[in-house]
Amino acid sequence: MASKAAPSCRLVFCLLISAAVLRPGLGWYTVNSAYGDTIVMPCRVDVPQNLMFGKWKYEKADGSPVFIAFRSSTKKSVHYDDVPEYKDRLSLSENYTLSISNARISDKKRFVCMLVTEDNVFEAPTIVKVFKQPSKPEIVSKAPFLETEQLKKLGDCVSKDSYPPGNITWYRGGKVLQSLEGEVVIIFTKKMDPVTQLYTMTSSLEYKTTKADIKMPFTCSVSYYGPSGQKTVHSEQAVFDIYYPTEQVTIQVLPPKNAIKEGDNITLKCLGNGNPPPEEFLFYLPGQPEGIRSSNTYTLTDVRRNATGDYKCSLIDKKSMIASTTITVHYLDLSLNPSGEVTKQIGDALPVSCTISASRNATVVWMKDNTRLKSSPSFSSLHYQDAGNYVCETALQEVEGLKKRESLTLIVEGKPQIKMTKKTDPSGLSKTIICHVEGFPKPAIQWTITGSGSVINQTEESPYINGRYYSKIIISPEENVTLTCTAENQLERTVNSLNVSANENREKVNDQAKLIVGIVVGLLLAALVAGVVYWLYMKKSKTASKHVNKDLGNLEENKKLEENNHKTEA
């Protein structure tokens, strides 16, 4: 167990201390330790059999010794000297290996292991080096932006708590940055904490940027020495906003300038390629020499065709930097003559024209009653079938939504016109009378019959198409009759008659009646003759039958008399 009282200095020990020599064959021995770890220093001297005790000391900067640990070989006791910086940090093993816990930078010393016998002192020196890995470097105090062609501080690369102090290196896009007068200035400083003796390294970078540095990553690294050699730790990337002046101005038109039509709103947008981009511009409209100051957009509402022209914009403080564009406001005019509802008489002439005025060639389509026509209509003499709803439609194919259309509703009127025809049935018993009527508005048809006769079929009418239709009746006149067809509309009342003869029909009917009567009389006479013949035949047959029966009776009587005669004789 460690002894708290210092042992008395024997004369032999004191003399041997002063006469101590380094054991032949033992050179300098170095122990590398990481900050905070335990330093382990073996004695590196074979323990002699006549060992009295062992001690550890370290040497100050002036070479004076400071004893820190003692172990007796006989009493097996351990004593640690009262050295404040090593209080509760030392451990001396039986083989005289000294351990120091929680390594500090101040432990960087020359330690000596001493084994003492009655006649000699053996020493084994050990050099202790303590290393501390620095913190990961960080770029701080970063510039909010950098301006091209100006030397400006980019930031500081800082790495803390290092021992020994490390070196800081700057990188641009992964390549090392070297100091270059007027373009790259690197200032390196290091500062030691007097308590921990650890270093903080700072490297300040001043840099002259160009547009090539846009989105270019900057990093830094710290290189340091540790127990296992040199190592390097890199920082995170830093990308800086690069400011540069506008070198070019462009102008845009919304919507796309090839699709602008009358009534649209136009938005002009002016852009500068600088960073940050310009916030205000001057806009120049066609025919206006003075610019209009505005933000990067300027809007014109409900534009007309006279807005076609050149539009420009420029920087406010640099009017020579200007951009321009030409805008065409497309238009489309359509004039239909005549238009609306037009009423004309049949046979009249009607010139029709559809005039187009447009910013470019336009397509024209004619429709009648929703059916496309092959050509534009032209009427030199109107017919009923010319009536209908006509539409002239035009459009600019390249400009969406630019269409125009006008319509003409044509009404063709006419007084009723009548044409009557008749057709005799093949049997000759009936006749079909047809009244063909033409006119608009649709005429009403009425039939009248003068004379006797019967209407075999009710009046039948055809569909009214293109101002025409007909009405027909079927009759079988018993005598000559007159049929009258009356057609009437809002314009006029028209009457037409047709005589129908009954002679042909009557003769044919009389001949047919005579033929029928002759046939009936002949059939009756034939039936009478056949009856008389049959009666005579039947009467004769009955008389013959009576005679036969009488003869047969006489024979029977004679036969019976003969039989009776034979019986009598017997």
Image (tube, rainbow, N blue to C red):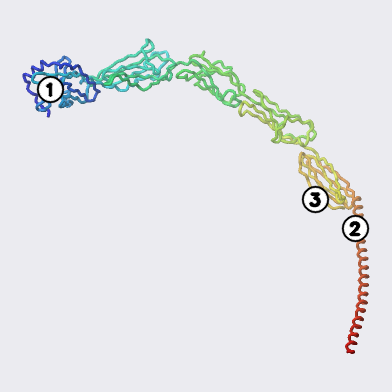
Q: Residues within 10 Å of mark 2 (few under 14, many from 20)?
A: few
Which residue shows up at 79% across the image and 47% down it? 460
Q: Residues within 10 Å of mark 3 (few under 14, many from 20)?
A: few
Q: Nearer the viewer, residue 357 or 33?
A: 33
Q: Are dots 3 and 1 in contact, CB under 8 Å?
A: no
Disc nearer the start of the sequence (2/1): 1
Disc nearer the start of the sequence (3/1): 1
Mark 1 = which residue? 48
Q: Which mark is residue 516?
A: 2
Q: Dot 3 lies on which element? A: strand
Mark 3 = which residue? 458
In the image as oriented, which residue stretches furthest toward the left? 11
Residue 115 position within the rendered picture, expressed as x and y whole percent measured from the top left: 13, 21
Tag nearer the camera, 2 or 3: 2
Determine whether 19 is above or below 255 in the image: above
Left or right, residue 110 beside residue 351 = left
Determine whether 413 is above or below 135 in the image: below
Residue 41 position within the rendered picture, expressed as x and y whole percent measured from the top left: 19, 23
Quarter of the rendering containing residue 112? top left
Tag nearer the camera, 2 or 1: 1
Q: CA distance from mark 2 to mark 3?
A: 31 Å
Left or right, residue 404 beside residue 439 = left
Tag nearer the camera, 3 or 1: 1
Q: Nearer the viewer, residue 569 or 136?
A: 569
Q: Residues within 10 Å of mark 1 (few under 14, many from 20)?
A: few
Q: CA distance from mark 3 to mark 1?
A: 156 Å
Quarter in which the N terminus is drawn: top left
Residue 147 position within the rendered picture, expressed as x and y whole percent measured from the top left: 41, 16
What kind of residue is marked 1?
Pro
